[in-house]
Image (cartoon, helix red, strand yellow):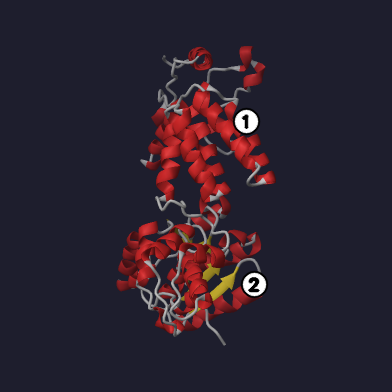
Amino acid sequence: MYEPLANRLRPKSFSEVIGQAKLIGILEKMLGEDKLVSIILYGPTGVGKTTLALLIAEHFPLNHFKFNASTDSKASLKQIVESAKLYGNVLLIVDEIHRMNRDIQDYLLPHVETGKVILVGLTTENPYIAVNPAIRSRVSIFRLERPSESEILKYLKNIDLTVFDKDVKIPDHIYEYISISANGEVRSAINMLEMVMIQAQDKQEITLQYAKDVLGKASISADYLGNNYYDILSAFHKSVRGSDVDAALHYLARLIVAGDLESLLRRISAIVYEDIGLANPAMGPKVAAMCDIARHIGFPEAINGLGAITIEMCLSPKSNSAHLAVNKAIADVEAGKTYKVPSHLINNPTYDDKQPYKYAHDYENHVVSQQYLPDELVGTSYYEPQDHTKIEKLFHEQYASIRKQLGKSK
C-alpha cells in the first residue's frame, strides 16, 4: 500500500519541525526537566499541532492516549482516567478540544487540576473564544504560526526525491512556486511536490506550466511574472493608502492575473477599515457587498467590481484613527492591564461592593455619568480623532460632548 509522502516525512524529532522554534524551545525545556504541564496548541491547519503532540507523546510511551472531542464518548474517557491509577499520570491528547461538551469537561477537569491527566488540546479555533473558561484556566495556551515562504522553500529543497525512483530534476522556480502556493501549510507543500513527481516522466523537464496543469488551482497562485506574491499585495495596499489610483490598478491587475480571488478580497477588506475607517464609514458596507458579489460571480466577471471599488477606495478620504485606537487598547491588555471590572457593570449581585447600575436610556441624551473603565484605567483615552474630514470632525465633537457628560476630562 502506498504511504503518502507527507506521512513518511512527519518529523521524528523536534529539530525537524518547521517554523515553531520558540514553542519547541519551551516544550523541550519542560520535557527535559520532566515538568510538562497541560497545554492547548491552536492555529490553522497544516502547521504542526498534531506532529508536536505526537512528539510530546514519545516521552510517555506507555501512558499516552488520544481522544477526539467530536466523536469519542465519556465512557472511553473514563477508561483513560482509570489508567492514571496504574501509571500515576497519563498524557491525554484531545483533538478538536473546542467541541468538548460540558459533561465531559466536568468529569475531566479535577483530574487535570491534580496533574493525574496531562492535557494536550488541539484546535484550529481561538481557545480564548471557543474553549470553556474552566479548561482555559487550567492550561497554558500556545499559538502556532504558519511557517514563512522561505522556511517552506528550504524544507522542500532538502527532501530526498529518490524515493520516487525517477530521473527528474525540480528547478528552483518550481520549488518557489510550490512554497508560495502552499499558503503556509507544510503538508500542502509536500502534497504538491509529491503530485508533481508522481505525474512526471523520466528525464522530463518540469516547467511552471506543467506544475500549474498538474496542481490545478493552488491555494495561493504565484505571480506569473515571478515576483513575490506578498510583495505585490503589500504594494497594492500601500498604493490604495497613498490614494494613487493608477498604481493601485496596476498592482490590482497583477493580483487578478495571479488568480487568487480570496486573498485579494481579504486584503481589500483589511484596507477599508485600517486606512479609510472613520473618514468614510460607508465604505465598509460597500466593500462587503462587492466582496459578496465577487465571490458569487468569480473571475473573470469579478474584475469590474474589483476595479470600481479600488478606484473608490483610492479617492476616498483616509483616516487611521480607529486602527490606532484599537491597537492602543490591545497594547494595554497585552501589557497586563486587565483589571477588575467595576461591580455595577457585572450581573452578579453577590459582589460585596456592588453599586447600582444606571441605565443610560433613562437619562437625558441617553448618556449618564458613571464609571465604566477599571479603577486603574480611569482617565485613559484611546481614540484620538482626526479633523481633516468633515465626518470625523463631527465624531470629534460628539466624542468631546459625551466625554464631558460622562464627567471625563477633555
Badge 1 vs badge 2, beta-carbon distance below 8 Å: no
**Amino acid at circle 2:** Asp
| Residue that label 2 marks | 72
Query: Dot 2: what SS?
Result: loop
Q: Quadrant of the C terminus?
A: top left
Residue 371 in view (yes/no): no
Q: Residue at x 55, y 23 (%)?
A: 280
Q: Which mark is residue 14?
A: none
Along the horizontal axis of the image, is 17 left or right of 220?
left
What is the x, y in percent for residue 92? 51, 72
The residue mark sitting in front, 1 or 2, is 1
Mark 2 burial class by Cα count in 10 Å: few <14, some 14-19, many 20+: few
Q: Residue at x 63, y 23 (%)?
A: 359
Q: Quadrant of the N terminus?
A: bottom right
User: Considering depth in this image, is 168 or 340 the residue closer to the camera?
Assistant: 168
Q: Residue at x 40, y 50 (%)?
A: 227
Query: Dot 1: what SS?
Result: helix
User: Considering depth in this image, is 50 or 35 the residue closer to the camera?
Assistant: 50
| Residue that label 1 marks | 286
What is the x, y in percent for residue 168? 42, 77
Q: Is residue 77 above or below residue 272?
A: below
Mark with earlier residue (1, 2): 2
